[in-house]
């Protein structure tokens, strides 16, 4: 008798003997679902529906990655650009570009470009990697001791 909760036949009948979840638990939600629906497509009796579900999750993952790529910068993101006249350096994400002990001012993605957030904490305490959020650092400048 098949146990449709703990070991459903449509996930455990692959000729390799591998259970689908052994693979998909190491993937993102979307990609795991693509594999899951492809895995069971000919085992559950609704192959076309499962293939369409797999395509839906694949399309969603492609859209998600394209959106991230559209706002991402080239591989040279770790190389800071030259400071502008006011000392601001455009930032495209990556590892902290200065000593973690430096004091910096930053501009955030959604902030008015004429304003900045003054960081009183060391640069090493800041989130330099971009998360595609309003708190992403888009520019910074180093504050030397005694500067405001």
Image (cartoon, rainbow, N blue to C red):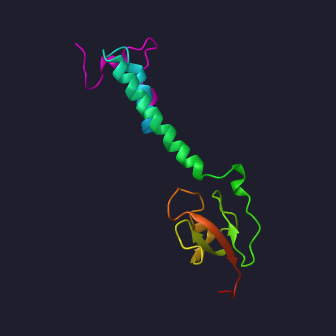
The image position of residue 147, as x and y in percent, is 68, 86
- On the rendered structure, is 86 left or right of 51? right
**How many tags in the picture?**
0
Viewer can see residue 107:
yes
Residue 22 lies in the magenta stretch = yes
Query: Which residue is at a point 68% across and 74% down the rendered structure image?
Result: 141
Task: Report x, y in % for residue 64.
Answer: 49, 44
> Residue at left 36%, top 17%?
47
Identify whether 27 is placed above or below 115: above
Determine whether, in the image, residue 108 is placed left or right of residue 94: left
Which residues are the magenta region? 1-26
Is residue 97 rendered magenta in the image?
Answer: no
Q: Nearer the viewer, residue 93 or 144?
A: 93
- The extreme right residue here reads 82
Relative to residue 42, is residue 50 depicted above or below? below
Q: Residue 94 is drawn in which quadrant?
A: bottom right
Quadrant containing the C terminus is: bottom right
Residue at left offset 47%, top offset 35%? 59
Residue at x 50%, y 41% (from the top left corner): 63
Q: Is residue 101 visible?
A: no
Give the quarter of the figure containing the N terminus: top left
Depth check: 93 or 121 in front?
93
User: Residue 100: which quarter of the image?
Assistant: bottom right
């Amino acid at each position: 008798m098949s146990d449709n909760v703990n070991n459903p036949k449509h996930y455990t009948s692959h000729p390799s003997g591998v259970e689908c979840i052994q693979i998909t638990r190491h993937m993102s939600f979307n990609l795991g679902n693509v594999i899951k629906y492809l895995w069971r497509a000919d085992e559950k009796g609704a192959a076309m529906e499962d293939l369409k579900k797999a395509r839906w999750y694949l399309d969603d993952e492609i859209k998600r990655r394209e959106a991230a790529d559209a706002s991402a910068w080239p591989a040279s993101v770790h190389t800071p650009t030259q400071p502008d006249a006011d000392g601001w350096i455009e930032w495209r994400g990556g590892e902290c570009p200065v000593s973690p002990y430096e004091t910096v001012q930053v501009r955030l993605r959604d902030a008015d470009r004429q304003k900045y957030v003054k960081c009183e904490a060391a640069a090493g305490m800041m989130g330099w990697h971009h998360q595609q959020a309003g708190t992403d650092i888009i520019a910074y400048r180093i504050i030397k001791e005694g500067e405001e």
